[in-house]
Amino acid sequence: TRLPRTAQLHAESLYFRYPAAETPVLDRVTLTLEPGQRLAISGRSGSGKSTFADLLAGLRRPDSGELLFGGCRVDQLPPDARRARIAYLTQRSDLFAASIADNLRIASSAADRDELWQALHCVDLADWATRLPDGLDTWIGEAGHRISGGQGRRLALARLLLRDPWLVILDEPFAGLDRATINTIGERLDGWLQQRSCIVFCHDTRGVPGLDRVMQLAAGRLHENRP
Ligand code: ATP
Ligand code: MG
């Protein structure tokens, strides 16, 4: 499947319920995101943000309704095409026991050292990595160098920056980070986000640069925040 270079995301009346649950997480959720738009979706803990993010990334299938990206059903895109076009930062950082470089390169094996350092700079980890005796080759994860939750979060984000997706889905990208770090990363992220569509799920929209829209997820429904 070939997608057009500029792709609109369109969700039409999505309904999703976990099999064991009585009430749906998403109920008649409709959303259109034009190419290049930047949207934040907030909502209380448990309101369904991560579930919605999974659906948008094609990792879960709605029970009913349609989710189209560039006119193609997201859950029917070949996995390779989907991963090339849609970058998804899950709420869990998903790092593995390997070097920093290998953790970064997992989805972009061709990235060179300069690109790795640029990505680390963008998430404000370059100074930290420079001070490690083994630098980019430092082993992290099991029996490796201990990294903090916030550093892990930022490494997972840096990994996305090596890719060239059209749609970026970020689930709580700034969880556990201090305000100054959030502001630094927000500014540096702005350039990479240009020309891409982006949906950020977060409790607090401060720190997300250049937002076009903010929406709320509550009781299964998605509402536009009117300014
Ligand atoms: P948070 O802000 O805490 O990350 P969230 O808005 O991302 O919360 P979800 O993780 O999408 O919320 O969960 C929405 C609802 O679905 C919750 O009631 C949760 O208990 C339930 N839920 C989440 N994952 C599953 C699962 N794998 N199986 C069954 N129920 C689930
Ligand atoms: Mg969540």
Image (cartoon, helix red, strand yellow):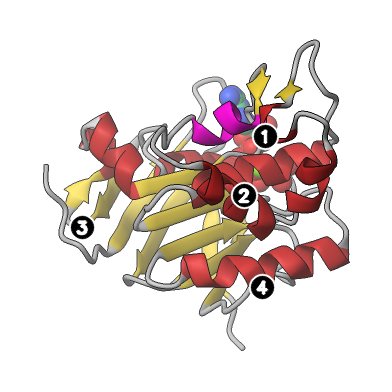
* Mark closer to the chain start, 1 or 4: 1
- Residue linked to disc 1: 136
- Label 1 secondary element: helix
Mark 4: amino acid = Glu
Give the crowd class for mark 1: few <14, some 14-19, many >=20 residues within 10 Å: many
Question: Which mark lies nearer to you, 3 or 2?
Answer: 2
* Mark closer to the chain start, 3 or 1: 3
* Mark closer to the chain start, 4 or 2: 2
Q: Is residue 29 above or below residue 196?
A: above
- Residue linked to disc 4: 187
Could you give the CA–CA distance between mark 3 and mark 1, rounded to whole angstroms?
Answer: 37 Å
Residue 102, x across and y down, in percent: 56, 27
Could you give the CA–CA distance between mark 3 and mark 4, rounded to whole angstroms?
Answer: 29 Å
Could you give the CA–CA distance between mark 1 and mark 4, rounded to whole angstroms?
Answer: 24 Å
Question: Which mark lies nearer to you, 3 or 4?
Answer: 4
Q: Is residue 169 above or below residue 132?
A: below
Instruction: Check if mark 3's residue and mark 1's residue have beta carbons within 8 Å.
Output: no
